[in-house]
Image: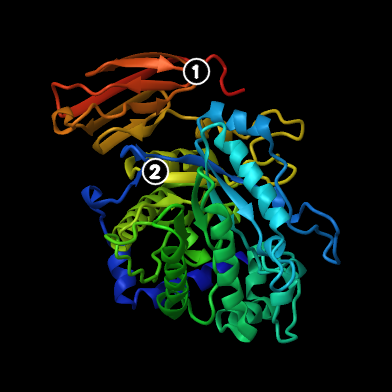
Amino acid sequence: MTTKIVILALCLLMLLLCNCAFTRRLMACPRMSKQKLLFDETGRISIYHGVNISNYSKHCAPPFDSTGRGHAGHPWHGEKEAADLESWGFNSVRYLVHWEAIEPEHGRYDDSYIDTVISKIESFGRHGISVIVDVHQDLYAQRYHGNGFPDWVVRDDNKKFKLQEPWAANYLQPAVRACFDNFWSNKDGILDANIAMVEHLLVKLKAVKNVLAIDVMNEPWPKGWPLTFERKILSEYYQRLTIVWLKHNNGSPHLGFEPWMSTSAGYPTNLRMDNDDEHFGGLVYMPHYYDFFCEQDKPYKRFNKWVIKRAFNIRSYEAQEFKCPVIYGEFGFPSAAKGYLSGMKDFLSLADKHRASWCYWSYDKIIHNDRGFLNEDGSIASNGFLLELVRIYPQKIAGMNPEFKFDGQTFNMTWECDVGSYTSLPEPTEIYVPSVWEIALSTGGGACRVGNKVIVEPDPKNKRQWIKIVVTNRNGFPQ
C-alpha cells in the first residue's frame, strides 16, 4: 500500500507541476514585510499557540451504531484542563464541533448542543484562551468509520464501501467518493444546507468574546481532480461563505478556510481567494502540516527538513496572495517515526521564523489518540510532545516587524516600536515564560515578570526594541 501511495503522490505532483499557479507557489520565497498578521483590540500583534480539542469528541457520545463507534459529542476537558493549558502557555484551542450534532435532522438545529459548546468556550475564555471553532469532518460520516456529516446528507448512490488501512485510504472508496461528489454538486440542496448550518452557528457564536474564528470545514475532500476542484468548486464555496460573513459581522470572528486535505503534505494549494481586505479583513488561512513519509512511519531525515522548510515558504506566500494571516490548524508527528521530535523542533522553529500561529493535534490522552500528550491517569506522557510545545514566545507584540527565536535555552526577539508616533503609550509587549522557570533577562526598555509573562515596556529612545531571555533552571516543568 505504501508503494502505491508514493506512486500516486508522484503522479499527482507531475500533474500539478503543469499548472502555472502551482509552480509559482512551489518556487515562491515569501516577503515577510508583506505578511498579514493577527491583531488584538489594542492594535498589538497576536501570536497564538494552541491545541486541538479533541479527537475524543468525534466518537464519544451514545448511542453506538453498527460501526461500533459513538456519535459526535463534547470533549472531556473541563476547567482544570483549561487552567493547565494556560499554565503551559497555550492561548488558543481549535475546538471540534460536528454538523451531525448541530443539525441531526434536516432543518432542526440542536441549540442545546451549541449552548453547551458556548459554555465550554467561555470556560476557556476565563483562562485567557481564544477559541477557533472547527466544523470537523473525516471520511464524511459515521457509517464510513468517519465523522462530521449527518446521516441525512449521505448520498452514496448505493456504491460499495470496504474498510481500508490506513484510514485515509477510505477516502478512495466508491461510497465516500460518491458522497463528496454529490455534496459538492449540491444534490438535493445538501451543500446549501451546509452553508445554512454554518450561518446558524455564526449567528450563535458571534457574540462570544473569545471566539477567534470559525474554521468552516476540516480537510475538504475533492470532487473530481484536485486542480479544478480547488480553483473552482472550493473557492466558490468559500466565496459564498464570505458573503454570509459580511451579512452578519465585520470580520470578527474570522472566517477560517482550508485547502483540500492532501496539501497537508506541504505542496501548494490551487485555491483562488478574492479577498478585498480593505472591506473585509476577516479571512484566516488555516492549512495543516503532516510529513508524508513520517505518516508512513518512515524516519525524519535531511530530505524531510528540506520539505518542511519549503512547505512554510509556500504557505506564507499563499497567505500573502490571499491577503490574510495564517494559522496552522493542525500539525503533528507520529511517535512511531524515528526522529519525530526533530520534526517537532523544526516545525516550531519555522513557525517562529514565519510568525505563524498554530494548533497541535491534539490535547488528548494517548488512549484516545496516539499523538496525545497525557497518560490515561492525566499525567504527562513520556513521548516528549508537551516538552517541545511548551516554549517561550510573544503572545502580544506592541509594534511591527517582529523577529524572534527560541532554541530551547535562549529566546531572542527584536521588533519596531516608535513611541513618539503614538498619542499615548502603547500597551506593553507580553512574552509567555513558565512561571516556575528561572531566567535571566536583558532588554532595551523596562521589563518585569508577572505570573507566567514577561511584560516589556517600550524603550522611548529607540525605534528598534529588543529583549533576550536565558533559561537557567526549568525546575522540572512541565512534568
The residue wearing badge 1 is 435
Label 1 crowd bin: few (<14), some (14–19), many (20+), radius 10 Å: some
Residue 225 place in picture, x, y as percent: 49, 80
| Image point (51%, 33%), residue name | 128
Q: Could you say whether the residue bearing mark 2 is in a helix, strand or loop?
A: helix
Judge left or right: residue 409 versus residue 125: left
Where residue 428 appears, x then y in whole percent?
A: 31, 26
Q: Residues within 10 Å of mark 2 (few under 14, many from 20)?
A: some
Per the model, the C-alpha gap separating discs 1 and 2 is: 23 Å
Q: Residue at x 74, y 72 (%)?
A: 151
- Give the number of the disc on residue 351: 2
Q: In front here: 289 or 258?
A: 258
Residue at 73% in and 46% down: 368
Is residue 286 visible to us here? no
**Residue at horizontal 64%, vertical 55%?**
97
Q: Nearer the viewer, residue 221 or 91?
A: 91
The residue nearer to you, when weighing 345 against 377, is: 377
Amino acid at pointer 1: Ser
Mark 1 in CB contact with mark 2 (< 8 angstroms): no
Which image quarter: residue 141?
Answer: bottom right
Res. 468 visible in picture: yes
